[in-house]
Image: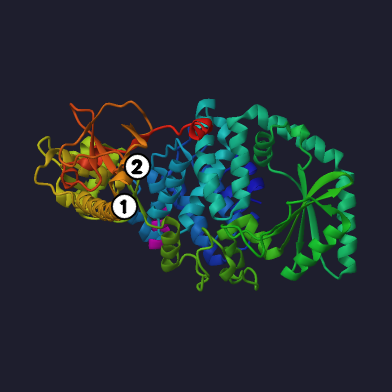
Amino acid sequence: MAESFDIRTNNTETDADTLLAAFFCAFPRFSDAERALFSRAWAFLLSKTDGITRSCGKPYFLHPMRVAAILADSGMDADCTVCGLLHSIFEIDGVARTEVESQFGAVITKIVGDTSKITSLKINSKTIQQADSIRKMLFAMIDDVRVILVKLADRLDRMRNLKSIEEKKQRLVAAEVIDIWAPLADRLGMQNVKSELEDLSLKYANPDVFQHIKAIVAQKKGERAAYLEKAVNAIQEQAQKAGISVQISSRAKHFYSIYQKMRKRNKGADELYDLLALRIICTTNAECYALIGIVHGLWKPMDGRFKDYIAMPKANGYQSLHTTVVCEGKPLEIQIRTAEMHSMAEHGVASHWLYKKGMNHDKVDVNSLGIFNQLQNLKDENLTDEGFFARLKGELLGDEIFVFTPRGDVVQLPAGSCAIDFAYHVHSAVGEKIVGAKADGKIIPITQPLSNTQIIEILTNPQAHPTENQLKIVRTSKARQKIHSWLVANDPTFVDKAAEAQRAADIAQNNSRSRKIQEEKKRHSKGTGLDARKAEMAAYTGKIIVDGTKNVAFTLAGCCRPAPADAILGYVSKKKGIMVHCADCLTFQRMANFEKRKVDVEWEKKPLPLKNEQKR
């Protein structure tokens, strides 16, 4: 309904009263009180945007009306639909928050305000990781999931009407949608919105490929009409025998999905067979499994193509049975799901509102809604509940926070990070010179944990430097590593406790090894005498091998006088090459920084004599 309504509202000659009547005609489910609320919001929007046009020359109010229609078509409640109508009202000069709140209440004002906050963000993702951080940050900013739903409707309508802007901007908007908004719709389980956003992005990012796929799909659909009709009739006949009532529809794969398959398989669209698919809608889970048996009884299933998303739903709550069978020598993809599963697949979290009181006596079992990695079983059906969304955000964001630079760039940090962590994230030089910080324009202690969505400004002083106290406080590995390195290099009073602990452990290990060596020497001397010792030493050349390399300059330490066959350690000296000590030498163990200077050394053995020489 929203799409046909959208086509009519593109007519700039349509007056406001006609648009409002067309909206209520397209969406008759609203009560009298809800219609009155929407009418008041429409009148308010018209009064504030009178005479204002978009860059394309069309009246300002057309886009908000289309956004409201998208939300109404998704089954959203009256408050959310009104928010779609007013979503950009704070962009208009002279519109005060207090004025909106006095007329429409705190809930609508908060949703509209948060939507405006997201609209004003500088969104620039250069990598997949950055895009994911931005998506998470969006959830960190808001307290009501309807903010995201309004923004998705806004993006969808803009993509539907993107042809009016220049090509360069079209590609930039398409890139943002494919990186940020389509995956966001996917996380919410809104497959219809996700697929349309992806297809429209492809249309503007790669128009030649889009038109080619469109032509191939249209051609293939015509070729396969009789083929699909046979398949549908066969399934319906067997389902009727089993006493199962089904609805079967055929659908073309979404263009972006085909494009991804083309890239993955390195084939043209005309070389792909599985461009069309069947969807079977039934009533119960048991019927779904009965139908998969019927389908596999009719045609041979392809190996590895059966997926049970009912028993194991996708992370966004999607449930269905998927299989691909060989029908008349061609692959045919078939999906089987219940009506409730289909609603969830089409609308995701928004499907909840489709089953509110007064619309349908049946209700979605919200305990089965899997959102954001199947967060939890929801006990409360009210998805606008503040506690629910707080838990939902907590699961989504995990141990992360998202703050802004003064320029609006998003910075992702571990939860508990302070301004010092933020400063080192910006640049090491900023971290080293930090003396103060501001959060949202107010001075804060640099050691205070930061909160989501704060705008952080760092104050520096050329005379400042890292301290040991900072090292104890920071949470990011970069800040810890940089502060530690500076203290080791510049602060003679700094005691590196971690290094001391490691040094003590190494000394203990060396002492243990020394004791074993001494015991071995005693046992050896008692058991075999000096002659055996000489024989053992004769097996070596008297040279050493350093890290596997022969003929390296070395010096035997005078303190412990290592001899061939002794356990030895080495370190790099400035003038004498490699200094070689006995492994149990206390002088070596007390040397400063020996861990950084030591090298692996071993005595070089003489080559074994040939067999005929041994006989002589």
* Image-based side of 561 in relation to 269, left or right: left
Which residue type carries mark 2?
Glu
Determine the CA span between mark 1 and mark 2. Answer: 10 Å
Q: Name the residue under label 1.
A: 524
Identify whether 27 is placed above or below 466: below
Foreground residue, 185 or 28? 185
User: Residue drawn 47% across and 65% down?
Assistant: 384
Residue 492 is a magenta residue: no
Question: Is the magenta region chiefly helix, strand or loop?
Answer: helix
Q: Residue at x 25, y 55 (%)?
A: 515
**From the viewer's perspective, is 172 left or right of 543?**
right
User: Foreground: 371 or 339?
Assistant: 371
Give the quadrant of residue 608: top left
Identify which amino acid the numbered label 1 is placed on: His
**Residue corresponding to mark 2:** 536
Q: Can you tell which quarter of the image residue 361 is in?
A: bottom right
1 and 2 marks in contact (CB < 8 Å): yes
> Where's residue 540, x and y in %?
35, 35
Where disc 2 sits, the SS reads helix
Q: Residue furthest front?
A: 616
**What number of labels is visible?**
2
Q: Residue shown at 41%/63% (left/top)?
A: 390
Find residue 9 and report its horizontal and vertical position in percent.
60, 43
Q: Residues within 10 Å of mark 1 (few under 14, many from 20)?
A: some
Q: Where is residue 563 in the image (x, y as percent from the top left)?
A: 26, 39
- Extent of the magenta region: 106-112
Please indicate, yes or no, whether residue 552 appears anywhere in the rendered image: yes
Percent x, y of residue 73 = 61, 55
In primary-sequence order, the first of circles 1 and 2 is 1
